[in-house]
Amino acid sequence: MTSERSSNLNRREFIRSSGAAVAAAAIAGTAATTPAEPRRERLALVGTGGRGSTMWGRNLLQDCGDVVEIVGLCDINAKRALASQKFIGINAPTFVDFDQMIGATKPDRVVVATMDSTHAQYIIRAMELGYDVITEKPLGTDEEQCQSILDAEKRLGKKVTVTFNARHIEGAKRIKQFALDKTLGDIISVNFHKYLSTDHGASYFRRWHRLRENSGSLLITEGCHTLDQVNWWLDSVPVEVEAHGTLRVYGRNNSFRSSHCRVCPYKDRCQFYWDITRSAFDMKLYAECESEDGYLRDGCVWKEDTNIYDSMSVIVRYENNASLTYTLDAFLPFEGDEVIINGTKGRIDWNSYAGGDYRREDLRLTRTFGKSELITDLPKPLAGGHGGADPSMHNLLFRQAGAPDPLGSLAGTRAATYASLIGIGAYRSIDRGGQVVKLRDLVAV
Ligand SMILES: NC(=O)c1ccc[n+]([C@@H]2O[C@H](COP(=O)([O-])OP(=O)(O)OC[C@H]3O[C@@H](n4cnc5c(N)ncnc54)[C@H](O)[C@@H]3O)[C@@H](O)[C@H]2O)c1
């Protein structure tokens, strides 16, 4: 999250002050000092928490402020909407009522960045009011939400774009290119192991994500990134899932607990103690808004009602007979991904780890009966959140809107449903003691 908040190059200022802008104005026969302002796309944002205020707020305007503007901010927490307005540095009006925001601001498109289980209601309402939607992942956290969105999109003829930024990571893009080029022949199996650290992993157990009714569990709120990536690489449809999940570290697995870190009597003993007062951003956006909704951003990781898992293993079978073995553990000393893709003509190994002294990032292609090579010519990522994936997504959505997208880096509701559906199938399988769940029984995609 820290990198999301870091300041990017202000492209608007750059373009305005560059020789290119002056030359363009001269060619157009206008004075360089009064360039014509192109019409900017008007966005209304619902959900002004961390992601809304950064990715869809301040960072978006830094990346694309010359082509988009934010005309309204809405959140169930009125104070947070105001704090967000201030953080982003705009005067757009704030609302707690979504319909009022839409009626008053008449945007071009709606952006949804609320808590996961509330996406569906805003996506559908925006379409009913006549708008296309950009939504944060996941599309939905259960079968009914996904089905209602798919049905509404068809019925209302509107378009929903789901922002899977993990498709925009340079390594992921190169793997997609290898898949399109059939470099590995037919892909038979994928092993994807996801490791979340005691920082990132624990952050889910401090907040609303710790309840399945809010997040659909980590299999959805976090897993949908990975599962969408694999579906995208394989270009096939997942058909059945079996899974195992357990909660072994967080939640009830401790002898002491409190409501949240600031008031905790065990600060000195708890290795998960997190001092929110050290972050001005978190204090303003969350702590100073608690009076409205009681949302504790530094909630205790040991809450006994936590009903998601911190260790999960999932096996997925695809329509093209490929299989995926996916694991997610959320309590580890360092963060990382370990991805192995096995095909009839070779194998890809993609590792990225970061934590403490340990850093590793490599993509390797090994051809069967052939050479093994490290891929060293990946483009340098853009400056910005999630290793440059966030600004890359901004560009594709706004600056290069309508431009060719040869890798298919923008996802719609069908792909997003399959990403959620594997997680939904997996938690249904865990509920049923590891039974195989057939995904077409859950949602008609
Ligand atoms: N793509 C990514 O890399 C990425 C990263 C972080 C978060 N996200 C997604 O962004 C979304 C927001 O996450 P966040 O980290 O900002 O969480 P957050 O808790 O900081 O913000 C969520 C906001 O939603 C608001 N909210 C909750 N229920 C609401 C309702 N019914 N109506 C209106 N507003 C409501 C809350 O008040 C809060 O301001 C989530 O869907 C999350 O999965 C995506």
Image: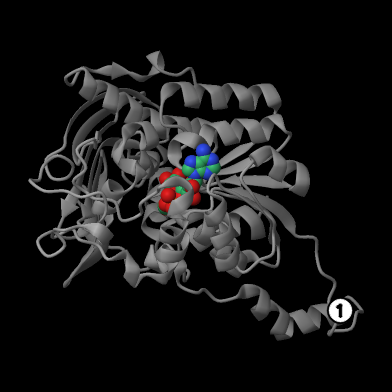
Query: Where 428 falls versus 251 (above or below)?
Result: above
Chosen colour scheme: one colour
Image quarter where the N terminus lies is bottom left
Q: Is residue 392 visible?
A: no
Q: Position of residue 273 (x, y in %)?
A: 20, 61
Task: Say which residue appears at 38% left-offset and 36% top-offset.
Answer: 214
Of residues 334 and 325, the one drawn nearer to the viewer in this rendering: 334
User: How many numbered marks, from 0 up?
Assistant: 1
Q: Amino acid at mark 1?
A: Ile
Nearest the camera: 196 or 277? 277
Q: Describe residue 56's horizontal placement relative to residue 258 as left or right.
A: right
Question: Does the residue tagged 1 have its C-beta within 8 Å of any atom of ligand 1?
Answer: no
Image position, residue 236 (x, y; %): 40, 30
Q: Which residue is mark 1?
A: 27
Work out which residue is located at the far top of the displayed protein and give it: 441
Q: Secondary structure at mark 1?
A: helix
- 32 w.r.t. 54: above or below: below
Instruction: Tell me, yes or no, if residue 26 can be seen here.
Output: yes
Left or right for 339, reference 35: left
Quadrant of residue 419 within the rendered picture: top left
Q: Which residue lies at the image location 55% right of the left edge and 60% below the top edge?
A: 84
Residue 331 image offset from top left, x and y in percent: 17, 51
| Spot occupied by residue 254 in the image (x, y as percentages of width and height) | 9, 45
Give the camera-side residue of 121 and 285.
285
Say few, some or many: other residues with alpha carbon within 10 Å of mark 1 (under 14 / 14 to 19 / 20 or more): few
* 199 relative to 271 in the view: left or right: right
Residue nearest the viewer, comparing 346 with 33: 33
**Res 170 → quadrant:** bottom left
